[in-house]
Amino acid sequence: MPRLPHERIFGVETEFGCLVADESVGTPEQIVEQIKNHLFYEMRIGAIDQHARDEFFEPAFSGGFLLNGGRMYIDAVGSHLEYATAECRSLRDLVANDGAGQRLIVRAIKELGLEDVVSVYNNSVDHFGGHTFGCHENFLARVDEDFFARTVTQFYPFLVTRQIFAGVGRVGGHVLYADGAKPNYQDVADNPVDYIWVSQIYGVRPDDAVEFQLSQRSDHILKTVASRVRFNRALINPKWEHFYSHEAMQRLHLLFGESNPNEFAYALKIGTTLLVLRLLEDRLVPDELHLAQPLIALREISRDKTYKWPVMMADGSMGSAIDVQRQYLALCERYRDESAQTNWILDEWAAILDGLETDPMSLGDRVDWVAKKSMVEQYRVSENLEWSDDALHSIDLEYHNIDPAKSLFYALQEMGQTKRFVDDLDVIDSMTTPPSNTRAKGRSMLVEFVMNRKGHRAYMFDWNGVALDRYNYVELTDPFETYDLEDSEETGL
């Protein structure tokens, strides 16, 4: 399909946590395997991989591509369930497609009869174990050599300060400490995949000085850019896979982000990032828009109880996270009126910054950290608890339960206390229907084709192409093209 100047491809990958109340039904690792098998073999949501996408991280039969254009799989690092959305060109498609992935998991749990003992969460931190889970954003962007040599430093101020409206909030904090230790032989033997490329690991302990903060992941980010991120988490992870490239563009993989239950916050987080990436590509961000120490600012903003969010700029001057965001917003105003989506982003970006400046705690309908803090504080006061009480961590966790029947967030949504971006019918449709204007549409048709054809023949799916058998390969190199293959003689669709 034709691509307009303001359009780009984007998607999100979410790693889910699994809690099993009664391990007589299985360990979390066994349960996620049951969920995955039920999704592919009983619910028939997609074509399971017959080949290993990666011998260590995604062996054969660990997941596959779906009828809705997304991908569901078990990541061998941590044996967690993960969902990657279809390639999207609109925020509405993205939010609906992501919600659809969660609904598919919830349906599988219920059909397995496990809903009373198994819960799945889209939170990004393990309060007690010290682990952190990813919600990674992918953008097709012009990532050339100059990007990581120069341009990326103009991106850090936006990413670091974006948490004031995109953070999901968390009770407490963590302190990381490096002791120079290396994994011992037994650790490596028991968890070989976890320790690939790891030369040093870090310890994690609770930080009792923190009652509540904006971001779940800010305490765990150690680098601005890093490739090997198992114990070296960064804001950005460079990706150079050829199957994500298109013309002069590559996949930009953002690690610092969290899974927003609130649809409005989700859409605004991705939407503002889309516009800022365009600014960077157009070389419109001034050189002086640099932070002195991005990683220190990341944690200080998250932990600031005054909600003034002061930051030091590279020239030594002081500003605030809101000031930084307003500078990016002002620069992005040049894109106004190119589309309804762009106007929505600009209008809501301005409104949310105004609200954060005047009364941040009034934004619970649009900002996850505000809604969560209000809920936790209300419970804490009613039960006369200290901020260190473990019960508050449980409230924090249940905000992220993806089952609408259990989730504290969905309780707010059911009461009309959240601002919606899509409706339930959009999400339900997206459980089986891909976006109509990206290559996810053509790949979805090929998924359906191999699922319904008679006889057993080997196939192989990837984002940029599909081998229907050993003789027929369909290229899907352009993510902006739909590859509508209904009349294709090659596939017989």
Image (tube, helix red, strand yellow):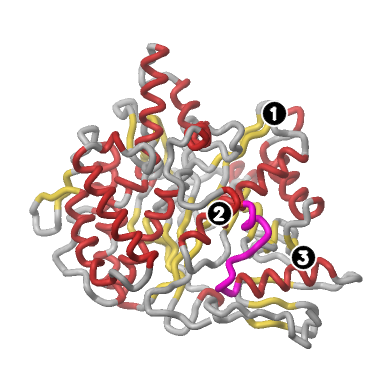
Q: On the image, numbered disc 3 is attached to which residue? A: 50
Q: Nearer the viewer, mark 2 or mark 3?
A: 2
Q: CA distance from mark 3 to mark 1?
A: 32 Å
470 or 419: nearer the eye?
419
- Looking at the rendered structure, which numbered label has been put on residue 45? none
Callout 2 crowding tier (Cα within 10 Å): few <14, some 14–19, many ≥20: many
Give the residue drawn at x 56%, y 76%.
243
Which region shows up in magenta? 428-439
The answer to which of marks 3 and 1 sits earlier in the sequence is 3
Residue at the extreme right of the image, as rendered: 455
Give the residue drawn at x 56%, y 36%.
401
Callout 3 crowding tier (Cα within 10 Å): few <14, some 14–19, many ≥20: some
Q: Is residue 101 magenta?
A: no
Whole-percent x and y of residue 6? 37, 74
**Label 2 secondary element:** helix
Residue 415 at least partly seen? yes
- Quarter of the rendering containing residue 446: bottom right
Residue type, numbered disc 1: Asp
**Label 1 secondary element:** loop
The answer to which of marks 2 and 3 sits earlier in the sequence is 3
Q: Is residue 436 magenta?
A: yes
Q: On the image, numbered disc 2 is attached to which residue? A: 98
Whole-percent x and y of residue 364? 36, 37
Say whether residue 396 is left or right of residue 121.
left
Q: Quadrant of the C terminus?
A: bottom right
Residue 76 at least partly seen? no
Q: On the image, numbered disc 1 is attached to which residue? A: 116
The answer to which of marks 2 and 1 sits earlier in the sequence is 2
Whole-percent x and y of residue 205? 40, 32
